[in-house]
Amino acid sequence: MLDQSTTDAFDDKDPRRAIERFYFAYRAFTAGADQLLEARGLGRVHHRVLYFIGRNPGISVGALIDALGVSKQALNAPLRELVERDLIRAEPAAEDRRVRQLSLSPQGQALEAQLTEIQTDLLGRAFADCGGEATDGWHAVMKRLAAN
């Protein structure tokens, strides 16, 4: 079975090493949140929606689509489900009633906070263990990857 120890066969300068580390790190990063979501019958897409609405209260559906890089059709079902579960509120914008502004309900805020805490704790421990220079490097790499 392939596991993280197989990455030791590659030189650190080999991009395949970075790919495998990225994969294993992402798996570890999402595992705790995924368990909490699964217990509620939700998935990673629901988490992304909750997170970005929580970070941007009052975001429009169109702006959320842009932020997530998904189609309106792809967002429709998970957004509708989160609204039906009273985790998200969708209200018409005051300046244009055709625009729906999204915010987290109190239950949505609580769930988003739990999910984010799992991941911020994991990142916080890693950053503390690796130090400021490594943390700055990590942010630089993530910023560069996201710019593509």
Image (cartoon, helix red, strand yellow):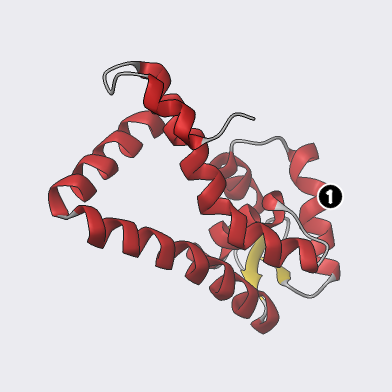
**Amino acid type indicated by mark 1:** Ala
The secondary element bearing badge 1 is classed as helix
Q: Pick the quarter of the image with the C terminus.
A: top left
Q: Which residue is mark 1?
A: 77
Identify the residue at image location x=45%, y=35%: 22
Q: Position of residue 113 (x, y in %)?
A: 54, 74
Q: Is residue 101 above or below residue 64?
A: below
| Image side of residue 45 versus residue 127, left or right | right
| Residue 105 % position (x, y) | 67, 78
Residue 83 lies, in percent from the top left, at 79, 67
Q: Residue at x 65, y 64 (%)?
A: 102
Asked whether 107 or 31 is in front, the reply is 31
Total tally of numbered discs in the picture? 1
Answer left or right for 59 relative to 22. Answer: right
Residue at x 63% of width, y 43% of height: 65
Q: Is residue 148 visible?
A: no
Percent across and percent down for residue 63 are: 57, 47
137 and 62: which is toward the camera:
137
Residue toward you, 104 or 39: 39
Quadrant (top left, top right, bottom left, bottom right) of the N terminus: top right
Quadrant of residue 107 within the rendered picture: bottom right
Query: Is residue 37 depicted above or below 62 in this figure?
Result: below
The answer to whether residue 134 of the structure is visible from this angle is: yes
Near mark 1 (Cα within 10 A), the count class, few <14, some 14-19 or many ≥20, is: few
Quadrant position of residue 120: bottom left
Q: In the shown orientation, is residue 141 left or right of residue 73?
A: left
Residue located farthest toward the bottom when viewing the structure as drawn: 106
